[in-house]
Amino acid sequence: MAGRIVRCASFGGRSVFTEANADRQRDGRYQAWGRGWNGVDSAFANDGDILDHQVAICETERGVRLAFHTNTHAGLPQRRWLAIGEDGAAEGDFGRPEIAVRRVFAQAERVALDGGADGHYGADAAMGRDLAACWLDGAGFPVPAKAALEAGLAAMAIDAAQREGRIVDVSPRFLAPQDIPARPNGPQVVLRSSIATSGSVAAGIDLIPGTWGLEHLYRPLAFVNWRPSFGVGVVDYAGGGTKPGSRAQAVAIDLSPLAIDVHVPGSNRSRTSPVTGSCVALTMSIMSFISGEYQKPL
């Protein structure tokens, strides 16, 4: 409905669970859940970096704005949410068994809910049932993988905004024009050389008639280019194995009718430095020996 979060700002910190308040640990209620796996002896004196309070404001790709507030030491425990639209609003608190819905200028309607406060107000048990049905019975999982990735990205963006003190923009950039490196469309000449640890040496020249992008064929392939090439080179081969010390010379002719370059756009921190690499390359090579036989070592 609202689309994924693309911009956010956040503020937060640790003001309660700090060493300055370590005396509160004497209250046994702070030990109610026990140490648990990989736990600590004190909720106040430890090396944890989890915030005990945080606020965030976010904007989605469809222009929906939202605000979020969490506090791990609230005197009045609650999990309230409020959604406001053009025609009405809905409000609920998972700590109370009802949801209030009201259209603009209309009477409010209240819908009763089942479940208590345990296990995140029944959500833990519901997710457990869904996971068991998916793993054991092959049922479809109600949350698609794409939605899970988007939620994770939103959480990381909010944390980055709080940590770095800036507005974080994670809007879709995979096909952004500025992230696609410009490549010359005309003919190119590329010189290449290589030296192997065995002593073999090769050098050549590649002729590339042009580079053609596929963005006009299929929009999601805007970052793919087709680059055929024809190359001629010479090789001085140093033999090994059963004929150590032998050498041979050859002329290599390479024809690459299908060479596809896939460009990976740069991250938001380095939008002008995308990485380029060959993803698919089908090469047909013809090799003929100049000498006709190996030169035996002295």
Image: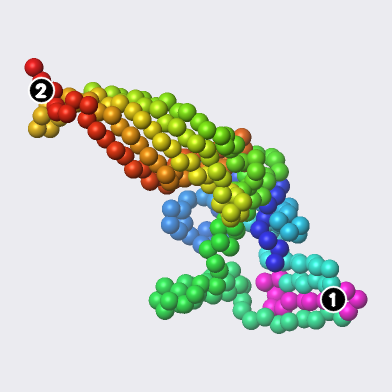
Q: Would residue 202 be found to the left or right of residue 143 on screen?
A: left
Q: Measuring 67% from the left and 55% from the top, which residue is drawn there? A: 5
Tell me, yes or no, whether the highlighted magenta stretch contains residue 95: yes
Relative image position of residue 134 (x, y in whole percent): 45, 74
To which residue does mark 2 refer?
296
Mark 1 residue crowding within 10 angstroms, few (<14) / some (14–19) / many (20+): some
Relative image position of residue 15 (x, y in whole percent): 66, 46
Relative image position of residue 216 (x, y in whole percent): 61, 51
To which residue does mark 1 refer?
103
**Which of the labelled discs sits on residue 125, or is there none?**
none
Range of the magenta residues?
Answer: 93-106
The amino acid marked with disc number 2 is Lys
Q: CA distance from mark 2 to mark 1?
A: 93 Å
Q: Measuring 36% from the left and 27% from the top, which residue is drawn there? A: 204
16 is higher (above) or lower (below) than 145: above
The amino acid marked with disc number 1 is Arg
Q: Would residue 59 be found to the left or right of residue 190 on screen?
A: right
Q: Measuring 56% from the left and 49% from the top, which residue is drawn there? A: 214
Q: Measuring 25% from the left and 24% from the top, which residue is drawn there? A: 236
**Residue found at the far right of this picture:** 105
Q: Would residue 133 be found to the left or right of residue 235 on screen?
A: right
Closer to the camera, 91 or 50?
91
Closer to the camera, 46 or 20?
46
